[in-house]
Amino acid sequence: MANVQDIDEAIFQLSVTRAVQAVFKTMIGKTAKPVPHFADTSVHAVALDQVHVVGTAGMVGAINGLIYLYFELNFAKLCAGRLLSLSPREIEQAGDETVNDAVGELTNMTVGTFKNQLSERGFPCRLTIPSILRGREFTITPIKSAVRHIYRFDIDGHSLTADLLVESGP
């Protein structure tokens, strides 16, 4: 079996891009445009001066890993409203839990689509349950055996960051 370090960066980038574009076009009716030449793999994936809602889901199998999707708070609310067909006022009334659920669902669909593309390339894996984080200061420090890729997308003037951490499975 191939090692995750042997997978070309272009495969990860193409797979993440296709997953983000498919899910956001289908579910919220918005086009996700990759931010070209963004190749930051520093500890901080996003600006620390804003509140973010972060969805994460993992994969277990031939490849083990996590994908974190960073939504600025206002963008998370916008996505929740579009996904649930609710107005901004209705989203505010529904509260944080509704926004968290919507971000969790978008994350689950995006990571699932990414995982399926890896499976089609000979790396079968299963999806884990998504979870949500909220806050301003996120530091992700991967274990040494993990490969990290960070991709940024522009969606109608909003920034979405996909932080991918993967390693070979058993």
Image (cartoon, rainbow, N blue to C red):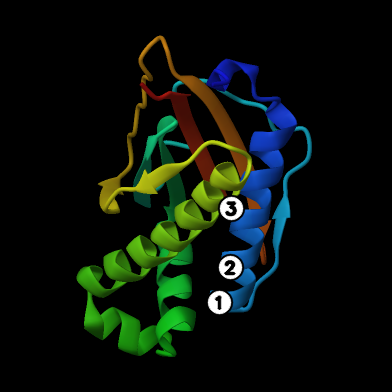
Q: Counting other residues with Cα less than 10 Å from the Cα at mark 1, is it few (<14), some (14-19), or many (20 or more)? A: some
Q: Counting other residues with Cα less than 10 Å from the Cα at mark 2, is it few (<14), some (14-19), or many (20 or more)? A: some
Report the residue marked by disc 2. Answer: 24
Please report contact status of discs 1 and 2: CB closer than 8 Å, yes or no.
Answer: yes
Mark 2 or mark 3: whose residue is earlier in sequence: 2
Q: Quadrant of residue 118?
A: top right
| Depicted 86 relative to depicted 160: above or below | below
Report the residue marked by disc 1. Answer: 28
Whole-number angstrom distance, CA of label 1 to CA of label 2: 5 Å
Residue 31: percent from the left, percent from the top? 70, 67
Report the residue marked by disc 3. Answer: 159
Mark 1 or mark 3: whose residue is earlier in sequence: 1
> Which residue occupies the foreground of this view, 21 or 36?
21
> Which residue occupies the foreground of this view, 45 or 117?
117
Instruction: Identify the residue at image location x=26%, y=74%.
Output: 98
Whole-number angstrom distance, CA of label 1 to CA of label 3: 15 Å
| Depicted 153 relative to depicted 80: above or below | above
Instruction: Identify the residue at image location x=36%, y=19%.
Output: 141
- In front of the other: label 1 or label 3? 1
Residue type for callout 2: Phe
Residue type for callout 1: Ile
Secondary structure category for the residue under label 1: helix
> In the orientation shown, which residue stands out farthest toward the right?
36
Residue 37: percent from the left, percent from the top? 77, 33
Instruction: Identify the residue at image location x=30%, y=48%.
Output: 128
- In front of the other: label 2 or label 3? 2
